[in-house]
Structure formats: C-alpha cells, structure tokens
Image (cartoon, rainbow, N blue to C red):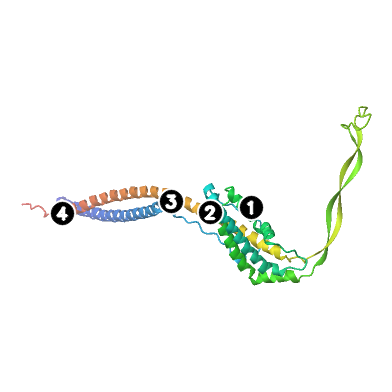
Amino acid sequence: MDDTETPGFGLKVARLLNRAEYIYLRILRGVVLLLATLLILYAVWLASVALYKISRSPDSVVEKKAEVSAPELVEAVVPAQTLPIATEAQEAKASAEEHRAYGQFVKSYFGLYRSQFERFKRPEDKSLSQDEFDDAFVQSQDRLSRIAQGKLNASEDLADLDTLLTTMTAAASNPETVKRLERYRSAAKVQTCNNVDRVRTEYRSGWDRYSMACSDWYADPMGCPVRRPVAIPYQERVCSMQLPKGVASYTQVFRAFQDRFFDLLTSRRQQYAEEAAQERSAIELGVSEGKASFGWALYVFGGFLVLMFFFLLIAIEKHQRRLSDAEPAPVTE
C-alpha cells in the first residue's frame, strides 16, 4: 500500500509546486512589465523636458517696453534717469541734427504748456518765455552738453521726450486735470500764519587768548578783549496770503505730471530689466539642468533594458515549461 500511495502523493506535491511556480512567474512577469513601462515613460518624460530646456536660449528673452499712461501722471516724484552712453562718432555726426530736434521739441512742449496749462493762470502769476520754459522744465542745453560728453543717448532721450509730449497732451485733456486747474484759477487765497524759526546775530564781549590787538596782550592772562558774534535762535510769526490746502498751481501740476512720468518710466525700465535678467538666468539654469536630466534619462533607459533582459529570461523559462509540458510521458513496459 505504501508503494502505491507514495508516487501519487509526490506527484500531487510536484504539481502543486509547478502551479505555484507558474503563478509566481506570471506575477513576476507582470511586475517587470509594469516597471519597464514606468521606466520607459519616465525616460521619455526626462528626455522631453531636457530637450525643451536645452533648446531654449537666453537671447530669446525680449525685455518689455516701459510705458506710462496719462491717468498715472498724478503724483510728484523726482525722477532718477539712467541712460546709455553714446559714442564720440555718434556725437559728432548727430550734433547739428539733435540741436534742431531738441529745439523742435521745446517749441511743441511749450505750445502744450501755453494752450493747456497757462490758460488757467491767475492775474498775479508770472508768464514764461520759451527760453525760460526750456530752462525750467526741459533743460535742453544741459541735455545737449551731456550728449557732447557721451553721457546721454540722444535718440533714446528724444524718444522719451516724444512719449512725454504725447502722454502730457492726453493728461492735460483729462477731465480731472481740467477740474483741478479750474479749482486753482477760481480759488480764493486765505491768510495763513505760521511760527517760523529764525536766527539773529548778536555781538557780545569776550576774550581771545590769541589776539594781539591790545598793547598789553603779552601780560597774564594773555590775549585781548574782543567782540564775538553769537547766534540767537528765535521764532517769528509770519502771515501771508496762500491758496487753500490741496490746491496746486498750473506750474506745480505741470511739473508733477512731468516728474511722475519719468519716475514711472525709470522704475518700470528697471523692473523689466530685472525680470528679463531673471528669466535669462532661469533659462541658463534650465539648460544646465536639462543636460543633467538627459543623462538621467539615459540611465533610466539603461534600467529599462536591464528589466527587459529579465523579462526575456522569464519568457524563455515560460516557453521551456510549455515545451516540457507538451512532451509525452515515457512509455513503460
């Protein structure tokens, strides 16, 4: 009975082990396929990102153009312009032409001032000639001098002035501007008194040990009596007729608009230049990271090939088992 039962039990155990091994190989095959798929997808993604980063160039970054709109000309802030330097060859060639260009701008700008701002003047306000207006607001001679010294780029400065003229023209016709200037022309001055700090000088007697202006200067104590100035601070109440608080003259409004224009223009140019520089730096960093990512993509692809080699071994093993199962059992006599 033992001889007949033992082979049957061993056969069952062998079949159970074969079944477990078959299931294990199928699971292992599925896991390898899943990992290989994830690796090839990751490698493709790394390679795509790397190629995109490498393909970008810092030279492709275009700095945005700084612009100022008419409604923004509302606050008076002193501008701080930084402009490129022109070469000496450009100075000599463009000198006469730039004199004419600045003269034409002053004429147009003064026309805007006279027609849109000075018409709101009060009887006691002074009138400016074109040359006086130039010295007060444009300073064309100073600009031409800086061009001759190579400290100012004439073409860019004239472009800014043309934009200023256009923006100031639009701001002058703004209803809020007209209302503000009308309020100035019709405002009644009120008496305003304030305590003003002043200093007066008084001469008092004193002693100067280094003075030799007296006959006995050498006697002890050495020196001579002198009168020395002494600053005496005091307050004086000063009253004057002034415009109500919040009312600005047409010249103050004009200068505030002009200063605000250059302040916004300068700050935005600096902002856009910084943004462009940051973007160029980001692209350069991206190119470096892209090259590293491309190397990682090659490593991942190598891992994919290793997994596919194991998958091939599993497939060969599975194929061998099928052939073994298909072989007929040996015939025993």
Q: Position of residue 202 (x, y in %)?
A: 89, 45
Asked whether the beta carbons under mark 3 and mark 2 sit within 8 Å of each other, the answer is no
Residue beneath label 2, please?
A: 273
Q: Position of residue 275 (x, y in %)?
A: 52, 55
The three-letter amino acid code for the residue at tag 1 is Asp
Query: Residue 323's mark?
Result: 4
Q: Earlier in the sequence, mark 1 or mark 4?
A: 1
Q: Earlier in the sequence, mark 3 or mark 2?
A: 2
The quadrant holding residue 116 is bottom right
Q: Earlier in the sequence, mark 2 or mark 4?
A: 2
Between 19 and 132, which is closer to the camera in this rendering? 132
Q: Earlier in the sequence, mark 4 or mark 3?
A: 3
Tag 2, which secondary structure?
A: helix
Question: Gap in Å between the C-alphas at discs 2 and 1?
Answer: 27 Å
Between 17 and 307, which is closer to the camera in this rendering? 307
Tag 1, which secondary structure?
A: helix
- Horizontal placement of 54 versus 323: left or right? right
- Tag nearer the camera, 3 or 2: 2
- Tag nearer the camera, 3 or 1: 1
Question: Which residue is situated farthest in the left direction here?
Answer: 333
- Within 10 Å of disc 3 (Cα), the crowding (few <14, some 14-19, many 20+) is many
Q: Earlier in the sequence, mark 2 or mark 1?
A: 1
- Horizontal placement of 128 versus 314: left or right? right
The three-letter amino acid code for the residue at tag 3 is Gly
Question: Gap in Å between the C-alphas at discs 2 and 4?
Answer: 73 Å
Residue beneath label 1, please?
A: 142
Q: Earlier in the sequence, mark 3 or mark 1?
A: 1
- Horizontal placement of 269 versus 245: left or right? left
- Tag nearer the camera, 4 or 3: 3
Query: Residue 286's mark?
Result: 3
- Within 10 Å of disc 4 (Cα), the crowding (few <14, some 14-19, many 20+) is few
